[in-house]
Amino acid sequence: MIPKAPSNGEKEAGLANSLQLKQLELNSLLEVTQAINFNLPEDSLYKIFYFTLIANLKIKKFALYVFDFGWSCKVNYGTKTNFKSIELDQSFFNVSKISKLEKAAEQFSEFDLLIPVAHKSQLLAIVFIGGLELGEENTDVSFVQTFANIITVAIENKKLARKRASAGSIPEGAGNRKRCTITFVPYLSSRQ
């Protein structure tokens, strides 16, 4: 039997769905960028990640592991197991690209994909996604990786700022205003 070609109405519906998904992705990027600019706490960034994957991308199962003085699950949804109490298996530490999980440790067998999040060559986080159907095009895995990367790097920057503030190199809350003034307003700075 010869497969039937999609009708114009089906093509238009597919394009409309694709356009709507891209709009949701852009809105998510705007929301997380504003949250970072307003210096919202880490928990707020994790909530944005959580709701974006559930509401906008319709991902059925996921877990986000982040390295923070050791690996821990920061966000978990739709799984039988509460991954917040499960240690990350060391076999995942050397993954450098998006991979299908075919022979994962038993606890992680409910996931289909592993998405590494790295900055330069340092692995910062790992996103596990499950419940995907083969050939499902509604899940933009590279967007999930990009989105997780933005959030994870923003949180890493917050940690670095706290570390510098506690070491006394930057007065807490000051945001290094004098250096910004010198950089952006050199005329005024030279008169100080």
Image (spheres, grey):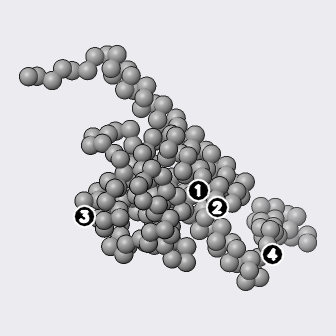
Asked whether the beta carbons under mark 1 and mark 2 sit within 8 Å of each other, the answer is yes
Which residue in the rendered view is the most extreme toward the front? 80
Which residue in the rendered view is the most extreme toward the bottom? 167
Amino acid carrying mark 3 in the image: Lys
Amino acid carrying mark 1 in the image: Tyr
Which residue in the rendered view is the most extreme toward the right? 192
Q: CA distance from mark 4 to mark 2?
A: 20 Å
Mark 4, secondary structure of its residue: loop
Name the residue tied to disc 4: 171
Residue at image point 34% right, 39% down? 137
Name the residue tied to disc 1: 46
Mark 1, secondary structure of its residue: helix
Amino acid carrying mark 2 in the image: Glu
Q: Is residue 117 left or right of residue 182?
A: left
Can you tell which mark lies on residue 42?
A: 2
> Percent x, y for residue 125?
47, 65
Which of labels 2 and 3 is toward the front?
Answer: 3
> Percent x, y for residue 156?
59, 68
Which of labels 4 and 2 is toward the front?
Answer: 2
Indicate which disc, 3 or 4, sits on the residue closer to the N terminus: 3
Q: Is residue 146 visible?
A: no
